Amino acid sequence: MSHTVPNQYRSEAARTLRDLPKVRTSVTSATDNFNHNRLRAYGEIDTDRWRNWARDVKTHTLTNLDHYLEQAEKSLTANGVHVHWANTSADALAAIREVVSEHDLKSVVKGKSMLSEELGVNAYLEELGVHVREADLGEYIIQLLGEPPSHIVGPAIHKSLEDCQQLFHEKFGTPLDGDPDTLAQAAREALRAEFLAADLGITGGNFLAADTGTLALIENEGNIRLSTSLPRVHVAFVGIEKIVPRLEDLAGFVQLTTRAATGQPIGNYISLIQGPQHRDEVDGPEEVHVVFVDNGRTNLLADEEAWEALRCVRCGACLNICPVYRQTGGHPYGWAYSGPIGAIIAPGILGLKEAMPLPYASSLCGACTDVCPVRIPIPELLLHWRERAVEEGLAPKTEELGLRAYTALAEHPQLFSIGGSLLRKLPWQRGGRALPVLSGWTQERDAPDPSSRSFQSMWKDGIK
């Protein structure tokens, strides 16, 4: 798969806007639909009460995470689940290598898992000679295209129906004008053989109840149900922040997450994994492994301000509403998590230097906070990382120089007046390079035409 990195965000975003205009059309259409459905679904419940409850449960869990992780390990072990601890991505990959080697596993079907994208699981398994097949339809499409996901919930939302028709015509011989049902049927037939041949199923984990060791997985297609029941081994990668204290908490979280993500009252399939197959059961894996993944999360948790980002339930609502994300989709962000949530967890997981300039990829409009089901104060955390960037000398130099120049002018009224007069005479058309600090803005849009007169002169003449 071709991947960018976060420090290429500006150039990749500009390239997408310039060379791939259909991406904006497809993403806007899909996210408009998500937003419409979320508004309707939120209107069916006492949303403020639900969101406050979810925020408080996640906050309580994160502030007592050591206790609940220990409890989860005991509960899982009692259920017959093998528990692995992965401090880094290398540790997580070593865990899956151990399982693959021990059981001589050759073929994998995967449920959609953003954590597996974060860890690079697919590429690693392929290097080991293991055949990997994504089973979620959106993930399957982008795997066929050799692309990473563009969205947390809808990995292929940047692709139009025409794009998918062309792809399936080339891969499966479906008609070029095949409707979505025809394309889905072709994928279903191809994936059925993959499910039957696979000896390893890999998933993520939406939530894990510490008191019972129950893994909860939300989906709409049934592929996760098959990935966790047909192969003889099931491995679930679970971020340490996905713990909830009690089994009964799952009822609220799976409903609220689905309403925020797709506008459904609840996902079509909710799988509650309790352990490996029992002797009296007709299906299920012989072994279940849960890999608890840190990979920078404890560093983020230790940040007195940024830790709130770990409440995220990966619903994608902040991406759907974000006016910045909706212009380009997720690929320019350069890593697994894009949009507003990606911009605030990237500095904690990747490191601030590696995550730049993602904290600046926002207008700070606040719409993301309005829709977040667990009330993460995303704009405040973006400003936190921007402040840290300034402190560490990572902020854009043009911004620093521009603010210094503005400060100097603002402290001297006559210079400020002269500077304003000069600015009104500069060319502001798209692509203009009159001022380096504004070149990024005018690269993709026209600036408003400046007033012919300054506010100061109009005030002096009594024009109010």
Image (cartoon, grey):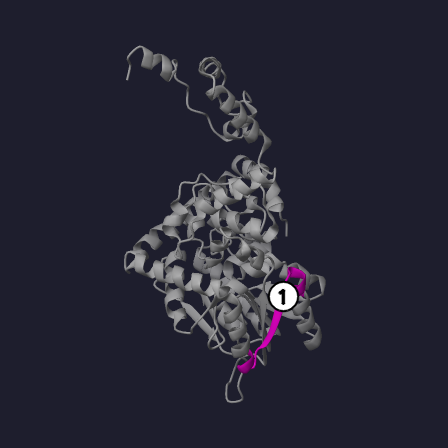
Image position, residue 38 (x, y; %): 35, 54
Residue at x 66%, y 69% (from the top left corner): 95
> Is 358 or 307 nearer to us in this picture?
307
- Disc 1 designates what residue? 86
With 5 as the anchor, is 441 left or right in this view?
left
Residue closer to the observer: 463 or 114? 463
Return the x and y of residue 239 as percentages of the image width and height. 54, 63
Q: Residue furthest front?
A: 411
Residue 309 lies, in percent from the top left, at 48, 54
For the residue pair 68 and 438, the one nearer the viewer reads as 68
Q: Residue at x 39, y 61 (%)?
A: 56
Q: Dot 1, crowdedness within 10 Å: few (<14), some or many (≥20)?
A: many
Report the quarter where the C terminus lies.
Answer: top left
Q: Quadrant of residue 250?
A: bottom left
Q: Is residue 81 magenta?
A: yes
Dot 1 amino acid type: Ala
Taking 306 as reference, is 44 above or below it? below
Rendering coords of residue 116 (x, y %): 58, 61
Look at the numbered disc 1 and give the secondary structure of its residue: strand
Residue 413: in sight, yes or no? yes
Q: Which residues are magenta?
A: 77-93
